[in-house]
Each structure stands twice: as structure tokens, then as C-alpha cells.
Image (cartoon, helix red, strand yellow):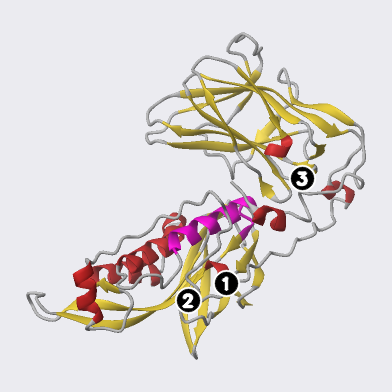
Amino acid sequence: MKSRIWGLVAIGGALLSSTAFAGTCKNLVLYENGQSKGFMEESTRSFPEAPEWSTNWGDFDNMKSPYIRLSGMRNYRGDWTGSLIFDALPVMVQGGALKLKVRSTQAGNFGVWLSGVGGNGKISFHTLEAGKTQTLEIPVSALLEGSTVEVDKIGIGLFNVPANQYTTLFVDDVALTCAQENAVSASTAAGEDAPAEIEPYPFVDVNPASPVREGLFEDVYERPVKSRYSVSEKESLKASTQAKFVIPEESQMRILGFKDAKSLTAKDSWRGWYNSMFLVEKGSIADGIIPNSKRLFDEAGELAAMSDNTMLPLLVADLDYGVSYCGDSSCAKQEIEDYHLILVGLSSPYVSSSKIRVVYDPYFSVVPAGKLPELELCTGGRCLSLSPKSEVTLEFESAGLQTIQVKIHSENHTFEQKLFVEVK
């Protein structure tokens, strides 16, 4: 799920030297017999119902009551996930394994992961049989990179759960086999009131004009966008315009609907950048002009998720294309008008904190001309300037749907756009 970027983002937090936190390695029980209660973060929970922490549905072979129970049903297929936080966390872990027992009333795909200072680690997937308890033991090194790491959450999930299927998941006997007995977490060592050290964002050295992106994540699926035009249609358009993309009027109206929207849901605001870029890419009449926007969108989302959505890379587009309009009442004749699009997007529909870092990395740009615009981000009446290869910290006054007013400065012109995000 992660590649080299993890080591850069988490280098100062999740990966800590064993000499700095020396201690005796011991088995640490996080949950057993309902005695070590915890809670599930609401900001990360997509399970239909909140967990019950000391439930007795009887004994299931090697799973003895009480145990954690998560149940529910949705009217659509999807993933159910959440982060469990136990009283013994956070804790320093040096190798060893994560152990737990799981059982589901329905067959399905179960995933478990660890979270540290640097964000979420790699998911370990396991196939569950209906009505059968499984004891899992997963090396910590397969979940979080580094010989010594700080663990603060245990993530669990059921993936691709069918619609209208009531499912119950049981979890019990959660333990880390090699916690450091005398260790303190990095945050505790610094003092409760001490601010956490912020690791500098690892900006990628890329020419914004280049359509080639090396790729941050090995598992990002790069879906090519097929042009709406045949070879002969492309040749005909090339004879009538210098534009590299030509889109129909209805597609342009959809792009402008997002760009000029005064109000959107957080999800529509998040998807709007990619949806708009997809429409532009569909109108390609020349190959290899811009990087694949789907890939950039997915990579930015993964990078945001690794920080538990406290650090969001911005997606930026600044490019020219042609818009095809009807030249007569029957649309037998087409007229192409040039249009300059400048568009900004967020890498997540929600953030998990009222204070977030917003990063302007040229890697996440679609700018054939190579000159990136300057930005201003405004929240709560306060505006912060944002240049390429820099970042700002935004603060929101409350939870719920919030607006980020973006001022885009390009070639002595200023454009404005509103982005919407949910603060959880």
C-alpha cells in the first residue's frame, strides 16, 4: 500500500531508534476478557453500528466471552472500517507481532493494520469463513516499516460487504508480542503540552510541464482515458484548431458547474477536480500532453490517508483547451473557442482535525506550460499565501462542512474558487 514515500513522510515520527527507547521486550495484552476496554474513533468509523466492548453471545470454540462485537447492515455494497484505541496505547514496539482472534457470521474479507505517528501502515488481508474463529499473528514489520515503531491505533475492517446483509464481527485477545516494557511514547517523553515535531514534507523534484510522473505508490492503478474521437476525427480537429484537447459544450458546462459552485457537498467538492480532468482528457486529440489525472488523484488521496487526513496535498490544473459549440441551429457546423482552465482540488472529502497542513507539491499538478500559479487559501476570514513547494496550516472554527476560499494568481489575473471539506 505504501512505497518509498512512507519512509520520507514518517522518518521523524514512526521510525524511532531502539537505543533511544531501550527497554525489555514483553507481551502486551491490549484486550482480553472484556477487561481492557477502549473506543473506536468516530472520525474513522464506517461500520454501521458502534462497537460493543464486552458482549456475550456465548463461547465460540477458542473465542471465549466477553469480546468486542461490531454489527450492522447497509443497503449498498461497501467497506466497513474503524480504528480501535486501547488504554495501553500508544506504546513503543520493537518487532514481534500483532495477535488477535476474529470471527464473522458471514464469509468475507477482513483487514487489519497498525497506525503510528506517521499515519496508517499496510493492511493485512485475511479471508474469513462464516462462523469460524481465526487466530491471526502478523509480524509488525509487515504492517509498519522500521525496527522500532510507536503504535497508537489498531485498524480493522470488513471489505466489500454485500448490500442488505446483516453481518456481525467478533474481535478478542488483541496483543502485541514485543512491546518495550520501560519505553515511553515519543509524545509522552516530550511532555503532554509539548508540540509534536512536524516532519518536513518531502517535495518531489518534478518539472510541472512534464507529462511523466515516476509514481509514488506501486499499487496505484493508472487507468488510461480513451479519447472520444476516432483517428479521422482527430485529424479533422487538428486542421481546425491549435488546441490539444477539444471538449463539447455540455462537458464544459459540467466543468464550470464545479469550478464556479457556491455550495457543494464535501464529496462532490473532492471528486470535482478529477471529474473535470476526466472530461478534458476524453477530449484529447494529441497523446502524451499531460500526466494521468486519475493516478495523481489516487496518489494524493493515499498520501492524505497516510497522515490520517491531517495533511492534504492540493491538486492543481492550469491548461488550455478548445470548446466545441454549435455553429448553426442544426449543429451541423461546429465552432471551437479557446478556454483557459485553472482548477484546484482537495485530496480528501474530510479531515480528522480542526488544524490541517495543506501542501502545494508540483508533482500533483497538470500544467503543460510549466508555470505554476500562486495561491491564497482563506478560512475564517484569514488568508494565507501558498507558493509551489510550500505548505500552510489551516484552522477551522468548528466541525462539519467548512469552506476554503481559494484565490488563484496567474499571469496578472486572479481567479477564485471555493472548496468544501468536512471536519470530523
Quickly name the residue at label 2. Answer: 367
Amino acid on which the number 3 mark rests in the picture:
Gly
On the image, the x and y values in percent for residue 254 come to: 31, 66
Farthest-out residue, left: 330
Q: Is residue 201 magenta?
A: no
Helix, strand or loop for disc 3: loop
On the image, the x and y values in percent for residue 83 come to: 63, 38
On the image, the x and y values in percent for residue 91 come to: 81, 38
Residue 146: assigned label:
3
Asked if the residues shown at circle 1 and circle 2 are in contact, with their CB atoms under 8 angstroms apart, the answer is: yes
At x 51% / y 22%, what residue is drawn? Answer: 168
| Real-space Cα separation, disc 1 to disc 2, in angstroms | 9 Å
User: Is any atom of residue 348 visible in this view?
Assistant: no
At x 56% / y 68%, what residue is drawn? Answer: 363
Amino acid on which the number 2 mark rests in the picture:
Val
Q: Which residues are magenta?
A: 292-311
Residue 201 in the figure: left or right of residue 424: right
Rendered position, 218 above or below 404: above
Could you tell which of marks 1 and 3 lies nearer the N-terminus? 3
Residue 87 in the figure: left or right of residue 49: right
Q: Nearer the viewer, residue 92 or 396?
A: 92
Helix, strand or loop for disc 2: loop
Decide: few, some or many residues near mark 2? Use Cα within 10 Å; few <14, some 14-19, many ≥20.
many
Residue 276: assigned label:
none
Residue 362: assigned label:
1
Could you tell which of marks 3 and 2 lies nearer the N-terminus? 3
Question: Where is residue 26, by image quadrant?
Answer: top right
Could you tell which of marks 1 and 2 lies nearer the N-terminus? 1
Q: Is residue 306 magenta?
A: yes
Rendered position, 93 above or below 64: below
| Real-space Cα separation, disc 3 to disc 2, in angstroms | 36 Å
